[in-house]
Image: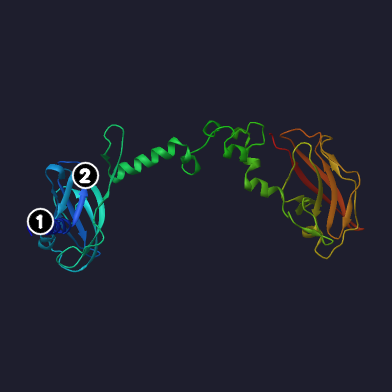
C-alpha cells in the first residue's frame, strides 16, 4: 500500500510541476526578464519571470497565480514575448523570446507545451550569444555581403565581384573562360537587344521571317527614311534583313522596286540585288569582314511609285567583344 501511495504521489507532483510554470524560457543565467502577454490589439499584461535554482539555473518561469494577479483573467490563446528588464507593457526592451499561451482564464491549458522560441545564435566563443533584432539584421547583411549577393540590388558591380565561370559569368560571357568583364550593358542588356529589332516575328506572304531581322523605317525627312532602331550583328554573321516601309509609303502602297543598296564601308557586305514585296524590302548582309566596335550605315533607294524615290537608311552595329 505504501508503495502504491508513493507512486501516486510522484505522479501528482509531476503533473503539478508541468502546470505550475505557464511560460518556460531558457536563457543566459542571471538575467532580469519578464513576459509581456498580448491581450488585445493595444493592451498587454507584463509579469516578471523567476529564474530557477540548482538544475533550474538559466530557466525562467511564471506561475498561474502571477499571471492572474497581473491581469490575465480571460480565456484564450495568447501570444507573448519575453523581454529583458523590469515588467512593462510598452518599453522598448531587448527581446529574448516569443511563444503562445493557451489559457483558461485562471490556469494554463494542458496543450501544447509553452516553451518560448530561443532568440539566440550559437558562436564558437560563447556557444549561446544572444542578439537583438538589430544585431540579427546586421549579421544577415554581413552574410549577404560576404557572398556578393548585395550586388544584385544594392551595390554596384565590377568584374572582380563576379567569379570567372560562375553561373552569372557564363550567362553573360561566351568566352571559354566565362568572364563578366566581357559583358557590355550598352549593347548586351535586354533593353539594348530589344532596340535592335522592331518586329522579331513579322509575317511575309504567310511565311514567318524568324530569324530574319525586320527594321521599321520612319522619320522621313527630305526624302530620307531612317531606321527607327539599329540592327546589331556579330562578326561572321549573315542576315536576311527586311525593311518595313509601311509607315513611310503607306499601308496600302505596294513597292515597285528598290535600287542597289550601298554600305558605308566594304567591311560590311550588302547584297547587290534586292527584292520588294508589298511594303517590304529584302536584302542580305554579311559581317564576315566587319570590325568590332564599328557602326555601318546602309542606304537603298526605294521606289513606291514611278514619280517618287525614298532613300532608306539604317545603321548596323558591331559589338566590341
Question: CB atoms at circles 1 and 2 under 8 Å apart?
Answer: no
Q: Secondary structure at mark 1?
A: helix
Which residue does the numbered mark 1 point to in the structure image?
3
| Scheme of image coloration | rainbow
Residue 246 % position (x, y)? 79, 60
Residue 275 % position (x, y)? 89, 52
Q: Which one is in front, 33 or 157?
A: 33
Q: CA distance from mark 1 to mark 2?
A: 38 Å
The image quadrant where one finds the N terminus is: bottom left
- Image point (71%, 47%), residue name: 196
- Image point (62%, 44%), residue name: 189
Is residue 93 left or right of 260 when viewed as pictured?
A: left
Q: Secondary structure at mark 2?
A: loop
Residue 192 % position (x, y)? 65, 45
The image quadrant where one finds the C terminus is: top right
Q: Quadrant of residue 295?
A: top right
- Up-down relation of residue 238 to residue 276 (above or below): above
- Up-down relation of residue 195 to residue 123 (above or below): below
Q: Quadrant of residue 101?
A: bottom left
Nearest to N terminus: mark 1 or mark 2: 1
Q: Quadrant of residue 220?
A: bottom right
Is residue 286 left or right of 179 when viewed as pictured?
A: right
Number of the label disc, if any, that sits on residue 27: 2
Q: Which one is in front, 281 or 204?
A: 204
Q: Residues within 10 Å of mark 2 (few under 14, many from 20)?
A: many
Residue 249 % position (x, y)? 82, 59
- Image point (30%, 46%), residue name: 133
Q: Which one is in front, 277 or 90?
A: 90
> Depth-wise, is mark 1 or mark 2 nearer the camera?
1
Is residue 88 left or right of 98 when viewed as pictured?
A: left
Amino acid at each position: 500500500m505504501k508503495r502504491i501511495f508513493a507512486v501516486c504521489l510522484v505522479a501528482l507532483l509531476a503533473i503539478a510541476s508541468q502546470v505550475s510554470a505557464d511560460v518556460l524560457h531558457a536563457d543566459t543565467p542571471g538575467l532580469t526578464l519578464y513576459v509581456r502577454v498580448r491581450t488585445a490589439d493595444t493592451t498587454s499584461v507584463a509579469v516578471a519571470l523567476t529564474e530557477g535554482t540548482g538544475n533550474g539555473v538559466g530557466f525562467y518561469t511564471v506561475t498561474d497565480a502571477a499571471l492572474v494577479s497581473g491581469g490575465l483573467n480571460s480565456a484564450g490563446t495568447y501570444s507573448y514575448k519575453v523581454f529583458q528588464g523590469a515588467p512593462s507593457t510598452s518599453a522598448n526592451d531587448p527581446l529574448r523570446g516569443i511563444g503562445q499561451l493557451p489559457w483558461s482564464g485562471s490556469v494554463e491549458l494542458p496543450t501544447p507545451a509553452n516553451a518560448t522560441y530561443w532568440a539566440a545564435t550559437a558562436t564558437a566563443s560563447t556557444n549561446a550569444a544572444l542578439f537583438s533584432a538589430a544585431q540579427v539584421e546586421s549579421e544577415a547583411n554581413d552574410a549577404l555581403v560576404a557572398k556578393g549577393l548585395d550586388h544584385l540590388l544594392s551595390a554596384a558591380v565590377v568584374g572582380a565581384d563576379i567569379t570567372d565561370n560562375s553561373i552569372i559569368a557564363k550567362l553573360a560571357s561566351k568566352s571559354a573562360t566565362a568572364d563578366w568583364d566581357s559583358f557590355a550593358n550598352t549593347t548586351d542588356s535586354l533593353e539594348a537587344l530589344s532596340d535592335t529589332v522592331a518586329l522579331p516575328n513579322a509575317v511575309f506572304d504567310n511565311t514567318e521571317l524568324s530569324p530574319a531581322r525586320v527594321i521599321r523605317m520612319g522619320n522621313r525627312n527630305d526624302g530620307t527614311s531612317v531606321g527607327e532602331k539599329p540592327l546589331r550583328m556579330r562578326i561572321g554573321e549573315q542576315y536576311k534583313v527586311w525593311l518595313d516601309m509601311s509607315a513611310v509609303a503607306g499601308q496600302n502602297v505596294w513597292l515597285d522596286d528598290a535600287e542597289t543598296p550601298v554600305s558605308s564601308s566594304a567591311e560590311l557586305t550588302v547584297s547587290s540585288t534586292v527584292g520588294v514585296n508589298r511594303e517590304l524590302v529584302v536584302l542580305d548582309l554579311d559581317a564576315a569582314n566587319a570590325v568590332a566596335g564599328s557602326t555601318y550605315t546602309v542606304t537603298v533607294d526605294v521606289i513606291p511609285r514611278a514619280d517618287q524615290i525614298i532613300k532608306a537608311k539604317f545603321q548596323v552595329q558591331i559589338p566590341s567583344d
